[in-house]
Amino acid sequence: GAVAEHTFIVSQVKMTHLCKETLVTVVNGQLPGPAIEVTEGDIVAVHVVNKSPHNITIHWHGVKQWRNCWADGVPMITQPCILPSHNFTYRFDVVGQEGTLWWHAHVPCIRATLHGALIIRPRNAPASYPFPKPHKEVPIIIGDWWGMDLAQVGSNMMHGVFNDYASASTINGKLGDLFNCSGTPEDGYVLDVEHGKTYLLRLINAGLFSEFYLKIAGHKFTVVAADANYVTPYTMDVIAIAPGETVDALLVADAPPSRYYMVALPNQAPLPDTQTPEHSTRGMVRYRGNPCPSNSEAASVSSCNNEEGRPAGSSGDVPVAPEMPDQHDTITSFYFHGNMTSRHQRRHSPVPVEVDEHLFIVLGLGAAACPRGLSCEKGTIDNGSNILVATMNNVSFQPPMTSTPLLEAHYYHTGSLNKTKELPDRPPVLYNFTDRALIPFGPKEKRLEPTTKEMLVRRFRHGAVVEMVFQSSAMLQGDSNPMHLHGHDMIIVAQGLGNYDAAKDVARYNLLNPPAKNTVLVPNLGWIAVRFVANNPGVWFMHCHYEFHLSMGMAAVFIVEDGPTVDTSLPPPPEGFPTHDDNLMSDGF
Ligand code: C2O
């Protein structure tokens, strides 16, 4: 394929929002960063020049990186960090994937400002799209604005301190007019449309914390793809999107020409009383290109609009606003995700029926001793001896403290993978996970499991069919759990509310046309069942994409062994790939 070459200059720039100037780390001076747009089969080469004071890596979220784990961009798992005033080139191909993915820094919190879209079109697009040809394609990146030093926020979280919150939500980097600086409204994102035309919205949730509901007054969306996999088109008046997820949706500009608010509402906020609906970001869809005749009396309201997009003859100063779901409504998201089916019945890549390994993974919170090498004074709980951690089957992930990245150690058998702990198949204690009153651990107000921090690893034979059931627990309260697997897509066979029960839930599995995703949202107080084939040799991170949980240890490393042939094995690192000798260790993700 063709080579799409990009240079990413990572640097700090000053941005001012809400009357406060903040130094933010971005690519090429932009927030969001530059979009990479390629055709399926192309090769992507990105030269990263780190002119910021931070250690960074960049992860190509959702790119399969087939036999190319070296380019996956996870600090100390696949590569050493790119140190300040160092460079690194990522090279990968995009084969067999079409749709919207994205890229982001994979160090704590800095991804809130260091991210952008990665758009993969089929050959001969738009004619070859399996949906009506759009007039235009529009990336819509939903995120949050922090107005503080994100590296500091990240380091606070690693040490168990959680006092920082985003100060606003954003669409394509703009806060919108629900926010103001001393009475002057912030700019909002504006999408200009022409009446009758169809737009392909490429939606990405790049936020650290919040799931979002997105609505446009007077309009509906037809969802056509998610996580760069086509889905059976379905029409909704709301999009639900969790951190890490992408959704491609068609928008038909078929409303009377006017101005319509586009609102992204953060839902399942970690602290309901600090993130109120006022923290929604508001942009606008504005009808253009259909001007009224100069004698506006002759114009009919529905067929033309003046320069500002207002219908002729209307007082029209206030755009139409959508009616949003309740901020704590989790059921709309449950159905939005549950509506998804794959566009293709799985004739060509059938759903694996024989499962080799079953993992039942309960997500929770625990109290663990402060790991050696960290100072946790500020974040201690239980009279100072423990920190708050996030767990899977009651173990919390401890980032590697060696100087050799795990992938390097795995490839050269250099042994630093010795001090690992296997991710258990199931939780140590079974209880009613979704009933807060029945959590068996700790004093009533805390309900934390006593636990430990470990380098959690799970090895899979090449080609193993793995089923994972993620079970959310009441311990997490309203927190969101979008679980992300690097290097593979997961096939979602079922989701449900309450406790998973194999005896009855397996019968409900969709093995005919289940959707495939790299990030799967575990329903609040519910479960999701996924399968994947561990066939991409390498060392892959699996973690919650909710930044609190990731920093607190809701993560594990999956090692996929080499297959029987050269073609199914991990090749050596690309030439010039930095080893532990060249760089320092990192301090997180
Ligand atoms: Cu988008 Cu490991 O993350």
Image (tube, rainbow, N blue to C red):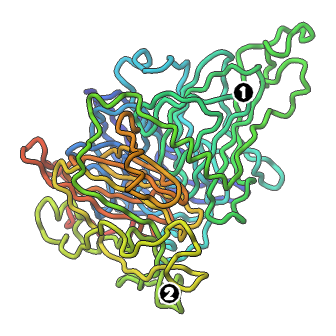
Find disc 2 in the rendering and name its residue.
377
Rendered location of residue 297, percent (x, y) = 93, 10
Locate residue 276: give its quadrant: bottom right
Say what amino acid the circle numbered 2 marks.
Glu
Q: Is residue 38 above or below residue 385?
A: above
10 Å neighbourhood of mark 2: few (<14), some, or many (≥20)? Answer: some
Rendered location of residue 65, percent (x, y) = 27, 44
Asked whether 257 or 464 is in front, the reply is 464
Rendered location of residue 525, percent (x, y) = 54, 60
Residue occupying the point 48% across, 82% down: 387
Query: Most extreme residue toward the front, as rendered?
Result: 503
Which quadrant is the N terminus positioned in? top left
Q: Is residue 181 above or below residue 30?
A: below
Which quadrant is the C terminus positioned in? bottom left
Q: Is residue 413 left or right of residue 108?
A: left
Find disc 1 in the rendering and name its residue.
286
Q: Is residue 182 left or right of residue 539?
A: right
User: Which dot marks residue 383?
Assistant: none
Locate residue 193: give its quadrant: top right
Q: Is residue 480 above or below residue 476?
A: above
Residue occupying the point 70% across, 30% down: 285
Rendered location of residue 526, percent (x, y) = 51, 57
